[in-house]
């Protein structure tokens, strides 16, 4: 086996490990990738959850609701720029266009979980139900991760040919 083939095999194995770690889910034409949440900030009783919904079908769908047993209330939120300040605001629904996607990520759209009924720590997971107009209910398993872990996994999940964020490093790590 050539060195290049060995390296390629290792790269595929690493990619597969990351793909398996994320709890992706398919419901009807929708695919929900990498549901995750951050631990609440010190002393707070709320947190946000994130994921990407891809619509692999020909019909538009909409995310119209969300609920979770770990929270007293769950809302869809958007982050909007208000001058230099980012504010968040409740939204009633999020469109998922055919062939398109809706990303929920830090600094943008998120699911807000208010009144957490239990501690949510790194490594925990909990169920979140996403209610879609066409596809119906999707129960995803949300993993509690640090922002750093999320960013690392995003780099690993980047499509082939995407810029390697470490390419400009000196190879010292
Ligand atoms: Cu919010």
Image (cartoon, rainbow, N blue to C red):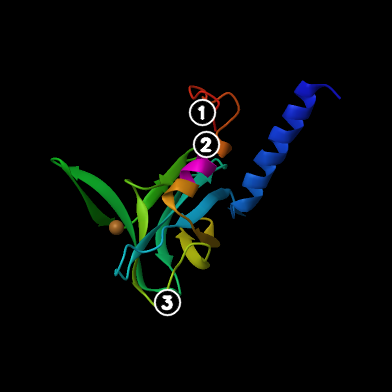
Residue denoted by label 1: 166
First of labels 2, 3 by sequence position: 3
Some atom of ligand 1 lies within 8 Å of the CB belonging to the residue at label 1: no
Q: Is residue 50 visible to us here?
A: yes
Residue at position x 36%, y 53% in the image: 110
Residue denoted by label 2: 155
- Rendered location of residue 122, percent (x, y): 48, 62
Residue located farthest toward the bottom when viewing the structure as drawn: 117
- Rendered location of residue 28, percent (x, y): 60, 53
Residue at position x 83%, y 21% in the image: 2
Q: Is residue 137 visible to us here?
A: no
- Rendered location of residue 58, percent (x, y): 54, 40
Q: Nearer the viewer, mark 1 or mark 2?
A: 1
Identify which residue, 41 or 56, lies in the foreground: 41
Q: Does residue 74 appear left or right of residue 4 in this picture?
A: left
Circle on res. 76? none
Residue located farthest toward the right when viewing the structure as drawn: 1
Q: Residues within 10 Å of mark 1 (few under 14, many from 20)?
A: few
Report the image quarter containing ligand 1: bottom left
Secondary structure state at the residue bearing disc 1: loop
């Amino acid at each position: 086996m050539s060195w290049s083939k060995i390296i390629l095999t290792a790269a595929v194995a690493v990619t597969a490990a990351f793909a398996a770690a994320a709890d992706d889910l398919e419901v009807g034409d929708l695919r929900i990738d990498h549901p995750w949440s951050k631990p609440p900030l010190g002393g707070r009783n709320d947190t946000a959850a994130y994921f990407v919904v891809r619509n692999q079908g020909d019909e538009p769908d909409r995310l119209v609701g969300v609920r979770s047993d770990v929270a007293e209330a769950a809302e869809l939120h958007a982050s909007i720029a208000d001058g230099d300040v980012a504010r968040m605001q409740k939204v009633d629904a999020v469109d998922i266009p055919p062939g398109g996607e809706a990303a929920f990520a830090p600094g943008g759209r998120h699911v807000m979980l208010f009144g957490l009924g239990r501690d949510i720590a790194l490594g925990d997971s909990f169920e979140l139900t996403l209610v879609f107009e066409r596809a119906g209910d999707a129960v995803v398993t949300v993993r509690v991760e640090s922002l750093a872990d999320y960013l690392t996994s995003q780099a690993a999940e980047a499509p082939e040919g995407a810029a390697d964020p470490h390419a400009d490093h000196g190879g010292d790590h």
